[in-house]
Image (tube, rainbow, N blue to C red):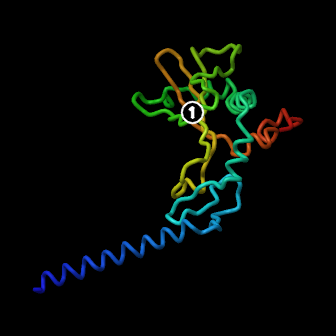
């Protein structure tokens, strides 16, 4: 065996040892019964997958399944946060949504509607005001800052006048459905 063949053989053996070692670590970590917790907040993914990503525990997913977003409370929140006067102030030429820009990508529509009317029945000078809301059910793995800034519900408030369109993309507080009165002060007597 010449020197070149010897080097190739050593490299191949080294790679095989590395592959076997990594495989053992992966199997051992997947068999671990006690997940490593990333944090104690019930609104953030708590299980460290060991690869830089996090996921929600079964208990967290079950809690989320028990607290769906209520359509009327959501609309009250949006209309309280964005009253007509505030929308009129925001909807200027400077804030027009640029043509070709991506609006919120709804991974899962909460109410199976793309256009939920906002300020319905109120007089205003817009052609249309509507909102849609996306629900991230927490079933994914979350990497980097998403593990610390995850939001369950994102919404896009859209205002149209003629050819002009404004889109306001925001997130609901994660605890909104657990304590709606906290975010709707005029409804302080609300209970879950």
18 to the left or right of 43: left
Q: Position of residue 71 (x, y in %)?
A: 71, 28
Q: Residue at x 65, y 55 (%)?
A: 57
- Name the one closer to the observer, 73 or 122: 73
Q: Position of residue 53 (x, y in %)?
A: 53, 59
Q: Is residue 145 above or below residue 31?
A: above
Q: Position of residue 150 (x, y in %)?
A: 60, 50
- Name the one closer to the observer, 21 or 152: 21
189 to the left or right of 93: right
Q: Is residue 61 above or below residue 168?
A: below
Residue 125 lies in quadrant = top right
Q: Residue furthest right?
A: 189
- Could you tell me which quadrant the N terminus lies in? bottom left
- Could you tell me which quadrant the C terminus lies in? top right
Q: Label 1 belongs to which residue?
A: 168
Count of numbered circles on the image: 1
Q: Residue at x 64, y 67 (%)?
A: 33
Element type at mark 1: strand
Q: Position of residue 166 (x, y in %)?
A: 53, 27
- Callout 1 environment at 10 Å: few (<14), some (14 to 19), or many (20+)? some
- Name the one closer to the observer, 33 or 75: 33
Residue 152 lies in quadrant = top right
Residue 65 lies in quadrant = top right
């Amino acid at each position: 065996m010449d020197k070149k063949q010897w080097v190739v053989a050593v490299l191949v053996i080294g790679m095989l040892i590395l592959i076997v070692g990594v495989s053992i670590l992966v199997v051992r970590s997947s068999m671990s019964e006690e997940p490593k917790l990333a944090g104690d907040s019930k609104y953030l993914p708590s299980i460290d997958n060991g690869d830089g990503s996090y996921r929600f525990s079964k208990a967290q997913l079950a809690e989320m399944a028990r607290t769906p977003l209520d359509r009327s409370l959501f609309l009250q929140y949006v209309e309280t946060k964005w009253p007509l006067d505030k929308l009129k102030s925001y909807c200027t030429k400077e804030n027009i949504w640029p043509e070709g820009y991506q609006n919120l990508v709804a991974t899962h529509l909460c109410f199976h509607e793309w256009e939920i009317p906002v300020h319905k029945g109120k007089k205003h000078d817009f052609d249309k005001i509507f909102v849609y809301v996306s629900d991230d059910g927490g079933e994914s793995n979350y990497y980097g800052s998403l593990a610390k800034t995850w939001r369950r519900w994102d919404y896009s408030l859209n205002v149209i006048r003629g050819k002009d369109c404004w889109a306001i993309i925001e997130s609901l507080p994660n605890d909104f459905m657990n304590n709606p009165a906290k975010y709707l002060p005029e409804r302080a007597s609300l209970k879950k």
